[in-house]
Amino acid sequence: MSRPESLQPLFRSLHTIKGVGDKLAALLTRFFGAPDGQEAIVLDILMHMPSGVVDRRRQVGIAEAYLNQIVTLKLHIDRHQPPPRGREHIPHRVFAHDESGDISLVFFRAQGGWVEKALPVGEERYVSGQIGFFNGEKQITHPDYIVEPDKFATLPLVEPVYPLTNGLSSKALAKLVRQAVEAVPALPEWIDVETIRQRKWPTFAEAMRMVHLPDNPGEAELWAPARQRLAYDEYLAGQITLQLLRSSMVSDAGVARQFTGQITAKVTRALPFSLTEGQNRALEEIRADLAAPERMSRLLQGDVGSGKTVVALMAMAAMAESGAQSALMAPTELLASQHFKTIKPICDAAGLGCALLTGKMPAAERRAILAGIANGTTTIAVGTHALFQSGIEFQNLGLTVVDEQHRFGVHQRLALSEKGRHTDLLVMTATPIPRTLVLTHFGDMAVSVLREKPRGRQPIDTAVLSIGDYARVISRLQARLTEGAQAYWVCPLVEESETLEVVSAEDRFAELQKIFGSDVALVHGRMSAAAKQDVMARFKASEIKLLVATTVIEVGVDVPNATIMIIEHAERFGLAQLHQLRGRVGRGTQRSACLLLYKDPLSETAQARLETIKSTEDGFEIAERDLELRGQGDILGTRQSGMPGYRLAVPDVHRHLLEFAHDDAKALMQRNPALTGDEGEAARTLLYLFRKDLAIPLIRAG
């Protein structure tokens, strides 16, 4: 199905709008981040929400205009006082009055005589701007608007303010916005009549008009009906997409698996520890999914070190009992080989064929592994997404386990399910995700949560210190390393940056080398994978005592002897990142420490972040707090991974609407899975409007 004809006006290139030339169009395309090779369109302008509203309705006499107020005054222009020649830094002043008092208008660097033209002596003008004081006199510096009395109607008394980019003026944007709002066609209504009546919501077109061209400031507020309606629309489009994804995953019937319990019993015996209650509970949920005839689509959430890999291994063992293979996919080769090292000995003990496939292995070895995957002697294949390239054939793939899901958007979930038409999907994430975000990004999946840490995990002492205490930190570190401990030292950037006064990893490494000599090594994102692995291997083998790193070590590096984590410029890291980094220590038997070094002055948010990390080790509590501190921000690294960043909804204010949208989307898909009739047409229009048309092909006919 192609885009509804009614929406065409909104999908026109901005070039078609009067007054938009090549330069402005290119600027807007960059600003709105249009997809590669496409120009910005009218819809982009419409979806660009104001960040606030200026109220110029206060029309008073000069006497009642108070400091810092924005007012609109009707003034009589008395005289001009331009700056003396050659004294450009002195402003041009214009003196004016009304019945109630006097005021001056101030213009800096006003060349070319335009001020005299705009404010002719002896005439009246409406002037709007913010009241200031200078030497006890009222003044307005650079008024926002100056209009002739007969043109008063052109002065916007209620004016939305937009986020701007260099080269784009608010006046130019306001013109475009007016044209975009006027281009909104009549659309079929996708929200049911009763909901609209109860919530007193306007139509989509009315809501856009109220937000962009409000008659009074209240109409455009985040909690006003117009903005609530638009936020709900955006959530609903996202939730319908996830429901379509779910139905396309589940409607390809899965296989009801049967288990003998023999292999899982062997794996359990081979484990060096017993499972926690949480792990057993998650396993029961997974087993129930596998035994059901529908395909499993489950998210396994657990904090760093909560033992997700073991749960996955038990699920793969259960799969083997039903005669099917499993694939375990990690985002990097480093992590894939680490998973492999963890599970290989246990697989050997339980008699499970387990192989690692990486892009770097010699051709002969690779051929042997591919043969094992194809003939079924390899029961568990571990690797990166390379496992799903076209040349790789599984004999009978039953379960795909994906590690670190938040790097995989909705598209990857779809692509993945193609390889095994009926495979079950288990996704593991070490990012504890708050409930609202689970709904947003994984509304199509069932969720299991591992809350407790495995037994034997040591608590981590966390301290916060100023970088001013560098000397103390070093002497403490020397003492600990002499006792045989190992430590990480994490820096935010690889090279010194001119604009940010941040110590780079390379500089810090040079400093520490003077003290620790060959005991210290450096690892960062620009090194080749082989060089990184080499350094990591030496660190693991205790040949290196101190590892200076950028955040490449964030995920999944396991060195039980490393008990100290020093994070420099901790104020520059997000909460989730700090929590992940801290989780790299505390993996052995000794007590571990994490030291957060900051540089003054700290912002309130940074202070709150450091306090939170210091006070709790519960990843879920940290994630909820992160959501509060960062608002809609970047908690899942959304910017990088094609996750839905919202344009109309502000989660802090509109969070409650997400639950409604989730339930409504679910009900709609149960009622009308093929999205047919008027209701279906309206829902499809909504998907196109929010550019979720990738989901359209998933709509099942019939």
Image (spheres, rainbow, N blue to C red):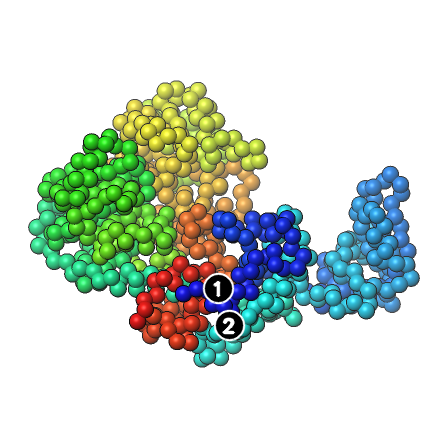
Q: Please identify the quarter of the rendering in which residue 556 is found.
A: top left
Question: How many numbered tags mark residues here?
Answer: 2
Name the mark on residue 187.
2
Q: Which mark is residue 485?
A: none
Tell me which residue sits at (46%, 27%) in the image: 506
Residue 135 lies, in percent from the top left, at 83, 51
Q: Which residue is mark 1?
A: 689
Left or right of 527 on screen, residue 129: right
Whether residue 179 is visible, yes or no, is yes
Residue drawn at the location 50% of the way across and 60% of the way down: 650
Task: Describe the element under mark 2 as helix, strand or loop.
Answer: loop
**Residue at left 12%, top 58%?**
258
Q: Quadrant of the N terminus?
A: bottom left
Return the x and y of residue 679 as percentages of the image width and height.
41, 75
Tell me where residue 605 appears, x and y as whole percent. Answer: 51, 48
Question: What's the amino acid at mark 2?
Answer: Leu
Q: Earlier in the sequence, mark 2 or mark 1?
A: 2
